[in-house]
Image (cartoon, grey):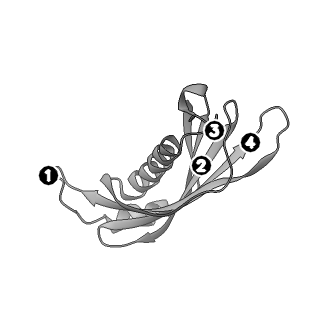
Amino acid sequence: MSLSAIRNGDASQMTALIFPETVNHHGTLFAGAGLALMSKAAFLAASRRARRRVVMAASDKIHFRTPVLPGQMLELTATITRVGRTSMGVDITGEVETLTTGARHLAMSGHFDMVAVDESGRPTPINPDTMEAQA
């Protein structure tokens, strides 16, 4: 799996090329590998927004809509949808692209709750000045 990440406005994007070692016995992306990619995208977006250490508190509404095949590109977009005192909501969408044709479609989506933590792993407030500078 090859990864790259960019930031575009309020959304962070992460791209992965799907390799055979990440597929299941059906020859499609293993759901656990897809969930791991989605959680990494949520981590990147939340870390950039809070400029603090973050951990995942929950994942919700995970939908695997269509299979992802080896050799396809998966582009994950992570958008901060809610910012609280110590936590953030992050929505993830994953579009798959067949590189030889350029055909794209939505393959997965989900919601993640991320919490800013201090060095001891306890929730810590998100700096509002950091949030305003990135909005």
Q: Residues within 10 Å of mark 2 (few under 14, many from 20)?
A: many
Asked whether disc 4 touches disc 2, contact meaning CB atoms under 8 Å apart, the reply is no
Asked whether disc 1 touches disc 4, contact meaning CB atoms under 8 Å apart, the reply is no
Instruction: Name the kind of residue labelled 2 in the image.
Output: Leu
Residue 68 at what x, y percent from top left? 66, 42
**Side of 12 relative to 55 (left or right):** right
Helix, strand or loop status at disc 1: loop
Which of marks 2 and 4 precedes in the sequence?
A: 2
Asked whether disc 4 touches disc 3, contact meaning CB atoms under 8 Å apart, the reply is no
**Side of 124 relative to 29 (left or right):** left
Residue, disc 2: 76
9 to 30, vertically: above or below: below
Residue 97: which numbered mark, if any?
Answer: 4
115 to 7, vertically: above or below: below
Q: Quadrant of residue 4?
A: top right
Which of marks 2 and 3 precedes in the sequence?
A: 3
Residue appearing at x 46%, y 44% in the figure: 36
Helix, strand or loop status at disc 2: strand
Residue 46 at what x, y percent from top left? 41, 56
